[in-house]
Structures are given as C-alpha cells and as structure tokens.
C-alpha cells in the first residue's frame, strides 16, 4: 500500500499538471473562438426563447436519441486484404476488394 503522504504529493503534482494544461488550453486561440461561438449561440437561443433541444430538432437531429446503429451482419467470410507494393518507393498499401454488384 502506498504511503498517504506520497500519494498526496503525487495527487498534488497531478493537480498542478492538469491546472497547467487547462491554463494552456484557455490561452489557445481555437479554444477561445469555440467558447465565443458557443456563447453567441446561447445568446441567440435566449433571445428567441428556445432550448438546445429545439435547435437540434430544427436542424433534424433528435436531442434525446442517439443515431441508431445498423446491426452488423454476422457470419459470412470477411474479405481478405490485398497487398500492393509500390516498386519505386517500397510503400505497401492494403486494400479490400470492392463489393461485387
């Protein structure tokens, strides 16, 4: 079992590392733009008295349901990968045969 003091020190180091990462992320231009965009959307929603679910519904997405996954067919053989080697560069590419129509 780990010494509680050692564990505490490790957790403090982890906490500082995470705080540094958060600070770095908050300074990132892309993050600031994304936060600004989200705030703009929330402002427009409040202005019009709409919710996020209504916004998603407006654009054809269901807020409560996730997209249904198509069941995977079981059985049958998977197609083998064909390997092609570029004789000039030596690059190897693996590809499956296209499905037969």
Image (cartoon, helix red, strand yellow):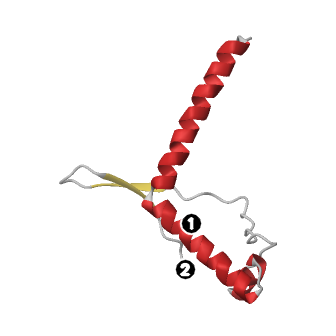
Quadrant where the image shows the C terminus: bottom right
As measured in the structure, the alpha-carbon distance from the residue carrying label 2 to the one carrying label 1 is: 47 Å
Q: From the image, tell me which residue sits under label 1.
A: 35
* Residue 41 vs residue 87, the one in the foreground: 41
Q: Residue at horizontal 62%, vertical 27%?
A: 12
Q: Give left or right: position of 98 versus 10.
A: left
Q: Label 2 crowding class (10 Å Cα cut-off): few <14, some 14-19, many 20+?
A: few
Residue in the picture at 74% in, 77% down: 52
Picture coordinates of residue 90 (x, y %)? 24, 49
Q: Nearer the viewer, residue 52 or 42?
A: 42
Q: Which mark is residue 101?
A: 2
For the image, the number of numbered tags is: 2
Q: Position of residue 9 (x, y in %)?
A: 63, 20
Say which element carries label 2. loop
- Where is 65 relative to 29, above or below? below
Quadrant hosting residue 54: bottom right
Residue 23: percent from left, percent from top: 51, 47
Residue at left 55%, top 70%?
Answer: 36
Q: Is residue 18 above or below residue 101?
A: above
Residue 64: mark in rendering:
none
Label 1 crowd (10 A; few <14 / some 14-19 / many >=20): few
């Amino acid at each position: 079992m780990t010494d509680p003091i050692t564990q505490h020190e490790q957790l403090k180091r982890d906490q500082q590392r995470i705080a540094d990462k958060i600070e770095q992320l908050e300074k990132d231009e892309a993050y600031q733009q994304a936060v600004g965009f989200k705030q703009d959307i929330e402002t427009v929603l409040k202005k019009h008295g709409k919710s996020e679910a209504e916004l998603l519904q407006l654009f054809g997405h269901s807020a409560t349901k996730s997209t249904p996954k198509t069941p995977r067919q079981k059985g049958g053989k998977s197609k083998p990968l064909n390997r092609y080697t570029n004789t000039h560069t030596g690059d190897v590419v693996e590809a499956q045969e296209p499905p037969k129509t």
